[in-house]
Image (cartoon, rainbow, N blue to C red):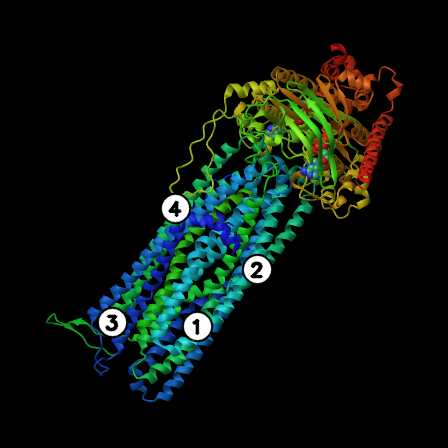
C-alpha cells in the first residue's frame, strides 16, 4: 500500500486516462456478453417450437440475419471500446514509464561520489530496465486486467445465474479450484522465471566482465578457464529454463484441460436439466451458458498471472524507490547554499580537515592555505590520501570533520554549479567517452545556459525538448590540445580531431589519454586546476611542454599538481608532503631540500642513478634509502597511535 | 554501449537456415518426436467439437427425446459422452505437455550450444576485434541474438509444421461434415491471414523501432552512469539530461506507435472471429430453415430434416474459432523467420570472423623457454586495411621497421615520447596483433608459429591500465585458478608491498572489489596488478608497461629489490617514463615515432648525448642548470 502511495503522484498525472479506460473496459465486457445471447436466440429459435410443434421453427431467416448482424455489431462496439481503452491506459503506462525514467535520471545526476563508489552499474541498469518494465506492466496491463477480471466475472456470473442457478452453483464450486490451481502454477512460474532471469543476468554479467577485460584474459591465457566457467553457467541456465518450461509450457493446455473437465460436468448436469425441465432450460441456454463460461478462460488464466505481475511490479517499484530515496551527502540545500556566490577566485583553505572511511583514517587534521594563483605541488606515498584531498576540493564528498573553504566561503554554502564551474580536474584515471577527440576535449565547455529538463510533470502536452546546440569551438579545442601537448599526436592521426575513440578511449596510448584529459580540463579556463598524477604516463620532454603550457594558462589561477616525480614538482610555488594522511612537510623545493626530510630523501633517491658517476656513498644502496623512508613512516604511524591513545584517554 | 544493430530483418536465406538446422541435428530424435506429437495433437483437436456436436444432437435437442423415447438411455449416453470428453481432454493434455517439453528441450539445448559456440569463438578472436566492437554489442550476440534463433526454431519452424497440420486436419473435417458451411466459414480466413500479416508486419517494424530506441536509451544510461562523476565534475548535467530526454522521448514515441498498431490489431481479430460466427449462424439457419427459392420466386421455409443440425452449427462455431490461432501463427512465421535470419546472420558473422591470430595446425610450443626476443624489421599498424604493400610514408604506420634483439636473461627498458609505440611493441611480443611486415621471434621462433596459449603462459604482462574483475581481491590475483595456493598470493603481495594494506581491510584477501576498484587508490591497484603477474607466471618473460607509474618511489624501490630476486636469469622488458625506474636495466632502448633511435646502457646513452641524455637532463640536472 505504501508503494501505491508513493506511486500516486505519477498515477495522478494520468488519472483521466486510467479512469476513462477502466470504464470502457466495463462497458466492453458487458457488450461482449451479447453475441452468445444472440446465438442462444437463434439456436432456441431453430430447435424450439413456440407453437408446440417441433416441426415448425420459432424463428424466421430474417430474424436470424438480424441476430447475426447483432453479433458483429456487438463485437465491433466492444472492439472500438477496447481500442480506445488501450490507447488510454497502455499509452498512459508508457508515459508514466517515460516520466519515471526521466525523473530517476535527473535524480541520479544529483547523487555523489560516495553513492557511486558503492553502487554497481549493472544493478542500476537492471533497475532502470527490468524493474521499470515490471512497474509499467503493472500500471498498463495490470490495471486494465484487474478491472477486466472483476467486471468479467461479475457480468458473466450474472448472466449464468439468470440462465441456470444449478449450473452456476457447479461453476461456483469448480471455478475456485481452477483459479486456485492456476494461481499456484503462476506462483511456481514466477519463482522459476525469476531464477532463470537471475541466471540469465549472471551469464550476461560474466560475458560483460570477460569482454571488458579481454586484455587481461588474453594476456594471462585464461580463455579455457573462462570458457569452462561460462559453460557451467550456461548449463545451469539450461536447467533453470527447462524447469520453467515444465510449469510454463503446458499452462494453456492445462487451462483447456480444466475447462474441458468443467464442461464435461456441465454437460452431464446441464443435459439432465434440459431433459427434465420441459423447455425451461433449453439447448440455446446451454450453449449460451457454456459460451459465457468460456469467455472467462482468459480472465481465470489472468488471475494467477496478474497477482504475479502486480507483486513483481510492487517489488520493483520499491527497488526504484530506493533510487529516489538515495540522498547525496553533497548537494545544494536551500537555506544553507548561498546562491549569491557565483564567481570564485580560487583561494583555498583547509581547516583541521579529517576524512575517515569506516575505521580507516585517510586524512588527519589537515591545515593548509593555498592563496589564489598559487602553484601547489603535492606528493606522498601510495595510499597517503592525495587523491582524497583533491576530491575534497571539488566536493566529491564532504570531510568527516573540519572545513574546506574557497574564497573564505565554506564549500557547503557554495552552489555546486558555481564550484564545478570554478574547478577543473584531471582525474588520476580519466574517463573518456566513446566519441570524437574534439567532443571529448570540449566536454566541459558550455557556451550558453541550457534549460533544465523539468521533472515531476506529465509528459502529455509537454513541448519537445529543445535542440541541443553544437558544442565544439574548434579554435578553443585546438588551443587546449596544443597546451596539453597533444596537438602533434592528433595531427598525426589520419582523421585528426574527428578520430573516434574506442570505449573509454582504449584506442589511444596511455599518455594520449592522459593528455586528452588535461586538454579537457584546460579548455574550461578554470580558477582552480587540479592534476592528479596526470603526468605519470608522459615522457619528461612532453611533461616539460605541458608544464610550460600550464604556466601559460595558470597566470592568476590556482594549480594543484599531484605527482611522484621531484622533477615534476620542483617548480611549484609550494610543495606539500602527505604521509599517512597528514601534512608532514611543506615549503618550496629548496626549503624542503634543506629540511632534509621525506622530500629531500625522495629527491636523492630519484637522482640516484644520475649520481652513479659521482661517489655519493650516502645513498649508494637503494634498499637502505627505502628503509629510511619506511622508518619515517613507522615513526609517523607510532606518533599517531600514541596521539589517538592519548585522545581516547582524555576522552575517558 | 549498445550501438543499435544495422538490420533487424532479412529475407529468407536457405544457407543460413541450413546452418541453423545443423544445430538442431544432434537432437533429431526430439525433432521427430515433436513432429509426431504435433501430428497427434492436430488429429485430436477437432474431436472435441465433434463430441459436442454429437452430445447436442443426440441428447439435448427436443427432437432427441422424441427419437429415443427413453430418458434412461439418454442419461446413459450423456454420461458416457461426458466421460469420453473428459478422458480425451486428459489425453490431449498429455500430448500437449509432452510436445511442450520436447520443444523446450530442443530449443534450450540449441540455445546453449549456440551460446557456448559464440562465447568460445569470441575467446579466440584477436584483441583488435575487441578494440573495434563495443562490449554492449558483443553481449547482444550472446543474449538477444541467440534468443531470436531460439524463437525461430521453437516458434518459427515448429508452428510452421504444427499450424500446417492443424489447418489440413480441420479443413478436411469441416469439409466432410458439411462442405457448404465449411466453405462459408473459410471465407473469413484469408482476410484473417492478410490482416494478421499486415498488422504483424507493422507491429514488427514498430517493435524494431522500439528496440532500437530502447538500445539507445540503455547505452546512454550506461554511459551516463559509468561516467556520472565526470559529467558532474565538468558541469555537463544539463546537456546530458537534455540529450537523454531526447532519446527518452524518442522511445516513448516509438512505444506509442507500437500501442497504436497493437490496439488496432486485437479488436480486428476479435471482430473477424465474430463475423465468422455470424456467418455460420446465418447460413446454418438458412440451411436448417431450408430456405430455397422456388419456381415462383417465393421464399420457402420449413425445417429440412438432416440438412444440418444445431450440433453441427455449434461445432462449426467452435471449429472455426479454433482455426484462428494456427492461421495467425502461420501469418507470423515469416516475421519470426526474418528476425531470426537477421540475428543468425549476425551470429554467424561472429562465428565466421576470421581468426586473424590463430594457431597454425602444427603450432609449436616452447618447453624449455629461454626468453630470447627478436624484432626483425617490424612494421605494424592497428589499421587492418594497412598491408605490407602500403607505402612507408603512410601516416597509419605505428611501428616503422623496428630491429630489436633481446638476449635471454637480459633486462631491457623502452623509453620514448608518449605515443612512440612502446606499448605496441610489448603487445606484439604476446602476439595480441600480427605485424604487417617483418617478424617477431621468441627463442628464435616466429610467434606466428607458436601456440598462443603456450606463448602467453610464458609472458607475464603488467598492463598500463589496470583492470580488476568483479570478485574478491584474492580472485583477482589468482584469476580464479584454484590451484594457486594462498601462500603464493601472500608472498607476491609482500614482494610488491601491498600485503599490509590488504590485511588492514575488513575482510583481508576476501574483500570484495568494488566496480573497477573504486575504493582503492590508483597506486594500490597497480600493485595488485603487479602481484597478479608475479602470481600467474612463476617462470616468465616479464613485461612491465608503466607498472609503477603511479606508485611512490619507496615502494618502487622495494619492488625493484624484490624483482632482482624474482627475475634472476629471466628476460624482462620494462617501460617507464620515470627514468629512475629503468636506469639499472642492462640496456635502454629509446623509441621515437615508431623507430628505435638509440640504444645502449644508461651510461653509454648519456655519453652519446642524444635524446635520452636530454630526457635525463630534463628530469634531473636541469634544475641545477636553472637554479
Ligand atoms: N571511497 C573509498 N572508500 C574507502 N577507502 C577509500 C576510498 N577512497 C580511497 N580510500 C582509501 O584511502 C586511502 C587514500 O587513497 P587515495 O586515493 O587518496 O591515495 P593516493 O594518495 O591518491 O594514492 P596514489 O598515489 O596511489 O594515487 C587509500 O588507502 C584508499 O584505499
Ligand atoms: N588499440 C589501438 N587501436 C588503434 N590505435 C592504437 C591502439 N593502441 C594504440 N594506438 C595508437 O598507436 C600509437 C602508439 O601507441 P602506444 O600505446 O604504443 O604508445 P606508447 O609508446 O605506449 O605511449 P604511452 O607512453 O603514451 O603509453 C598511438 O598513436 C596510439 O594512438
Ligand atoms: Mg591517487
Ligand atoms: Mg603505453
Residue B301 found in image quarter = bottom left
The residue at 42%/42% (across/down) is A459
Cα gap from disc 3 to disc 1, whole angstroms = 27 Å
Residue designated by label 1:
A260
Relative side of B582 to A513, left or right:
right
Q: Nearer the viewer, residue B460 or A28?
A: A28
Q: In this view, does B89 lie above or below B380?
A: below
Q: In which quarter of the image is ligand 1?
A: top right
Label 3: which residue? Answer: B285
Same chain shared by disc 1 and disc 2? yes
Q: Which residue is drawn at 48% across and 48% down?
A: B15
**Which residue sits at x=53%, y=42%?**
B349
In the image, farthest residue toward the left = B296
In the picture, the disc for residue A191 is 2
Q: In which quarter of the image is the C terminus of chain B?
A: top right
Queried on whether the Cβ of the residue with tag 3 lies below 8 angstroms from ligand 2, the answer reads no
> Can residue A219 be seen at all in this image of the molecule?
no
* C-beta proximity under 8 Å, tags 1 and 2: no
Tag 2 secondary structure? helix
Image spot of residue A537 (x, y percent): 68, 25
Query: According to the image, label 4 marks what residue?
Result: B257
In this rendering, the label closer to the viewer, 2 or 3? 2
- Looking at the image, the residue that sits furthest to the right is A617
Looking at the rendered structure, the secondary structure element under dot 3 is helix
Q: Please report contact status of discs 3 and 1: CB closer than 8 Å, yes or no.
A: no
Labels 2 & 4 near each other (Cβ < 8 A) = no
Neighbour tally class for label 2: few under 14, some 14-19, many 20 plus, Cα within 10 Å: some
- Distance in Å between CA atoms under marks 2 and 4: 33 Å
Q: Where is residue A350 in the image (x, y as percent from the top left)?
A: 69, 27
Amino acid at each position: 500500500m505504501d508503494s501505491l502511495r508513493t506511486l500516486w503522484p505519477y498515477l495522478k498525472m494520468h488519472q483521466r486516462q486510467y479512469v476513462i479506460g477502466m470504464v470502457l473496459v466495463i462497458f466492453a465486457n458487458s457488450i461482449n456478453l451479447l453475441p452468445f445471447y444472440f446465438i442462444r436466440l437463434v439456436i432456441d429459435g431453430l430447435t424450439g417450437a413456440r407453437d408446440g410443434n417441433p416441426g415448425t421453427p420459432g424463428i424466421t431467416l430474417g430474424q436470424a440475419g438480424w441476430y447475426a448482424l447483432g453479433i458483429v455489431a456487438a463485437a465491433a462496439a466492444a472492439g472500438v471500446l477496447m481500442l480506445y481503452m488501450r490507447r488510454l491506459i497502455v499509452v498512459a503506462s508508457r508515459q508514466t514509464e517515460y516520466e519515471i525514467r526521466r525523473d530517476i535520471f535527473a535524480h541520479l545526476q544529483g547523487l555523489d561520489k560516495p553513492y557511486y563508489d558503492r553502487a554497481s552499474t549493472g544493478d542500476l541498469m537492471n533497475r532502470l530496465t527490468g524493474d521499470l518494465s515490471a512497474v509499467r506492466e503493472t500500471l498498463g496491463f495490470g490495471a486494465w486486467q484487474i478491472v477486466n477480471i472483476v467486471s468479467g466475472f461479475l457480468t458473466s456470473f450474472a448472466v449464468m445465474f439468470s440462465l441456470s442457478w444449478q449450473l452456476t452453483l457447479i461453476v461456483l464450486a469448480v471455478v475456485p479450484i481452477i483459479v486456485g490451481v492456476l494461481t499456484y502454477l503462476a506462483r511456481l512460474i514466477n519463482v522459476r522465471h525469476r531464477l532463470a532471469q537471475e541466471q540469465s543476468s549472471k551469464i550476461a554479467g560474466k560475458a560483460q566482465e570477460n569482454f571488458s577485460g579481454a586484455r587481461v584474459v588474453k594476456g594471462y591465457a585464461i580463455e579455457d578457464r573462462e570458457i569452462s566457467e561460462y559453460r557451467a553457467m550456461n548449463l545451469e541456465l539450461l536447467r533453470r529454463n527447462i524447469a520453467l518450461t515444465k510449469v510454463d509450457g503446458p499452462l494453456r493446455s492445462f487451462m483447456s484441460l480444466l475447462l474441458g473437465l468443467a464442461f464435461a460436468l456441465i454437460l452431464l448436469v446441464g443435459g439432465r436439466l434440459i431433459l427434465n425441465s420441459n423447455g425451461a432450460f433449453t439447448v440455446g441456454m446451454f450453449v449460451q451458458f457454456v459460451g459465457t463460461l468460456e469467455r472467462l478462460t482468459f480472465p481465470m488464466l489472468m488471475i494467477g498471472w496478474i497477482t504475479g505481475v502486480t507483486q513483481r511490479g510492487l517489488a520493483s517499484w520499491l527497488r526504484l524507490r530506493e533510487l529516489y530515496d538515495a540522498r547525496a551527502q553533497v548537494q545544494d540545500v536551500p537555506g544553507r547554499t548561498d546562491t549569491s556566490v557565483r564567481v570564485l577566485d580560487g583561494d583555498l583553505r583547509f581547516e583541521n580537515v579529517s576524512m575517515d572511511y569506516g575505521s580507516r583514517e585517510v586524512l588527519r587534521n589537515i591545515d593548509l592555505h593555498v592563496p589564489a594563483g598559487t602553484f601547489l605541488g603535492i606528493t606522498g606515498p601510495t595510499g597517503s590520501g592525495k587523491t582524497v584531498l583533491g576530491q575534497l576540493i571539488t566536493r566529491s564528498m564532504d570531510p568527516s570533520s573540519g572545513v574546506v573553504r574557497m574564497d573564505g566561503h565554506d564549500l557547503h554554502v557554495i552552489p555546486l554549479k558555481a564550484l564545478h564551474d570554478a574547478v577543473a580536474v584531471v582525474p588520476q584515471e580519466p574517463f573518456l567517452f566513446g566519441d570524437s577527440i574534439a567532443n571529448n576535449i570540449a566536454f566541459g565547455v558550455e557556451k550558453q545556459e541550457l534549460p533544465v529538463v523539468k521533472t515531476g510533470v506529465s509528459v502529455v502536452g509537454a513541448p519537445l525538448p529543445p535542440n541541443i546546440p553544437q558544442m565544439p569551438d574548434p579554435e578553443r579545442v585546438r588551443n587546449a590540445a596544443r597546451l596539453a601537448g597533444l596537438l602533434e599526436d592528433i595531427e598525426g592521426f589520419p582523421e585528426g580531431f574527428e578520430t573516434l575513440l574506442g570505449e573509454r578511449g582504449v584506442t589511444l596510448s596511455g599518455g594520449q589519454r592522459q593528455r586528452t584529459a588535461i586538454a579537457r580540463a584546460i579548455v574550461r579556463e578554470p580558477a582552480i586546476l587540479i592534476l592528479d598524477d596526470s603526468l605519470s604516463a608522459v615522457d619528461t620532454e612532453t611533461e616539460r611542454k605541458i608544464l610550460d603550457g600550464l604556466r601559460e594558462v595558470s597566470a592568476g589561477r590556482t594549480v594543484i599538481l599531484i605527482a611522484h616525480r621531484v622533477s615534476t614538482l620542483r617548480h611549484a610555488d609550494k610543495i606539500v608532503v602527505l604521509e599517512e594522511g597528514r601534512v608532514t612537510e611543506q615549503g618550496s623545493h629548496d626549503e624542503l631540500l634543506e629540511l632534509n626530510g621525506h622530500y629531500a630523501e625522495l629527491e636523492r633517491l630519484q637522482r640516484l642513478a644520475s649520481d652513479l658517476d659521482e661517489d655519493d656513498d650516502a645513498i649508494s644502496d637503494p634498499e637502505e634509502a627505502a628503509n629510511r623512508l619506511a622508518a619515517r613512516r613507522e615513526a609517523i604511524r607510532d606518533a599517531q597511535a600514541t596521539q589517538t591513545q592519548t585522545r581516547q584517554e582524555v576522552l575517558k | 554501449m549498445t550501438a543499435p544493430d544495422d538490420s533487424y530483418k532479412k529475407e529468407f536465406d536457405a544457407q543460413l537456415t541450413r546452418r541453423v538446422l545443423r544445430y538442431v541435428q544432434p537432437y533429431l530424435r526430439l525433432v521427430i518426436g515433436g513432429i509426431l506429437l504435433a501430428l497427434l495433437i492436430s488429429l485430436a483437436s477437432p474431436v472435441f467439437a465433434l463430441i459436442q456436436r454429437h452430445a447436442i444432437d443426440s441428447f439435448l435437442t427436443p427432437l432427441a427425446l422424441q427419437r429415443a423415447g427413453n430418458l434412461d438411455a439418454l442419461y446413459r449416453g450423456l454420461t458416457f459422452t461426458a466421460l469420453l470428453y473428459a478422458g480425451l481432454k486428459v489425453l490431449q493434455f498429455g500430448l500437449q505437455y509432452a510436445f511442450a517439453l520436447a520443444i523446450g528441450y530442443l530449443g534450450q539445448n540449441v540455445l546453449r550450444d549456440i551460446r557456448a559456440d559464440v562465447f568460445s569463438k569470441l575467446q579466440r578472436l584477436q584483441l583488435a576485434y575487441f578494440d573495434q566492437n563495443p562490449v554492449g554489442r558483443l553481449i547482444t550476440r550472446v543474449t538477444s541474438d541467440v534468443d531470436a534463433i531460439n524463437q525461430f526454431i521453437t516458434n518459427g519452424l515448429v508452428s510452421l509444421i504444427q499450424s500446417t497440420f492443424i489447418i489440413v486436419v480441420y479443413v478436411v473435417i469441416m469439409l466432410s461434415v458439411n462442405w457448404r458451411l465449411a466453405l462459408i466459414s473459410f471465407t473469413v480466413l484469408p482476410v484473417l491471414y492478410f490482416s494478421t500479416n499486415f498488422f504483424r508486419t507493422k507491429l514488427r517494424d514498430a517493435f524494431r523501432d522500439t528496440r532500437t530506441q530502447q538500445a539507445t536509451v540503455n547505452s546512454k544510461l550506461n554511459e551516463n552512469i559509468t561516467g556520472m562523476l565526470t559529467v558532474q565534475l565538468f558541469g555537463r548535467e544539463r546537456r546530458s539530461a537534455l540529450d537523454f530526454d531526447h532519446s527518452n522521448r524518442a522511445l516513448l514515441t516509438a512505444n506509442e506507435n507500437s500501442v497504436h498498431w497493437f490496439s488496432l490489431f486485437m479488436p480486428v481479430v476479435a471482430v473477424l472471429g465474430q463475423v465468422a460466427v455470424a456467418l455460420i449462424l446465418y447460413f446454418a439457419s438458412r440451411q436448417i430453415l431450408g430456405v430455397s427459392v422456388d419456381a415462383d420466386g417465393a421464399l420457402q421455409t420449413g425445417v429440412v430434416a438432416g440438412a444440418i443440425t444445431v450440433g453441427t452449427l455449434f461445432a462449426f462455431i467452435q471449429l472455426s474459432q479454433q482455426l484462428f490461432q494456427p492461421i495467425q501463427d502461420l501469418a507470423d512465421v515469416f516475421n519470426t523467420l526474418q528476425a531470426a535470419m537477421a540475428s543468425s546472420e549476425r551470429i554467424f558473422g561472429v562465428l565466421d570472423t576470421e581468426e586473424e591470430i590463430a594457431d597454425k595446425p602444427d603450432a609449436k610450443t616452447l618447453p624449455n623457454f629461454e626468453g630470447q626476443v627478436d624484432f626483425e624489421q617490424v612494421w605494424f599498424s592497428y589499421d587492418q586495411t594497412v598491408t605490407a604493400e602500403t607505402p612507408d610514408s603512410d601516416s597509419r604506420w605505428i611501428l616503422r621497421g623496428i630491429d630489436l634483439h633481446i638476449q635471454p636473461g637480459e633486462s631491457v627498458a623502452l623509453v620514448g615520447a608518449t605515443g612512440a609505440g612502446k606499448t605496441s611493441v610489448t603487445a606484439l611480443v604476446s602476439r595480441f596483433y600480427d605485424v604487417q611486415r617483418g617478424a617477431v621471434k621468441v627463442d628464435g621462433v616466429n610467434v606466428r608459429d607458436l601456440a598462443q596459449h603456450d606463448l602467453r603462459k610464458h609472458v607475464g604482462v603488467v598492463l598500463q591500465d589496470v583492470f580488476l574483475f568483479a570478485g574478491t581481491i584474492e580472485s583477482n590475483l589468482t584469476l580464479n585458478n584454484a590451484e594457486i595456493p594462498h601462500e603464493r598470493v601472500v608472498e607476491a603481495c609482500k614482494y610488491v608491498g601491498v600485503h599490509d594494506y590488504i590485511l588492514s581491510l575488513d575482510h583481508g584477501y576476501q574483500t570484495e572489489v568494488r566496480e573497477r576498484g573504486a575504493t582503492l587508490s590508483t597506486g594500490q591497484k597497480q600493485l595488485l596488478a603487479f602481484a597478479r603477474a608475479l602470481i600467474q607466471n612463476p617462470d616468465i618473460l616479464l613485461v612491465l608497461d608503466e607498472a609503477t607509474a603511479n606508485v611512490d618511489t619507496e615502494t618502487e624501490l622495494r619492488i625493484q629489490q624484490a624483482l632482482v630476486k624474482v627475475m634472476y636469469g629471466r628476460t624482462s622488458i620494462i617501460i617507464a617514463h620515470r627514468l629512475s625506474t629503468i636506469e639499472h636495466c642492462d640496456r635502454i632502448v629509446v623509441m621515437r615515432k615508431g623507430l628505435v633511435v638509440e640504444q645502449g646502457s644508461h651510461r653509454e646513452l648519456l655519453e652519446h648525448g642524444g635524446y635520452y641524455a636530454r630526457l635525463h637532463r630534463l628530469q634531473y640536472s636541469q634544475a641545477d642548470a636553472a637554479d
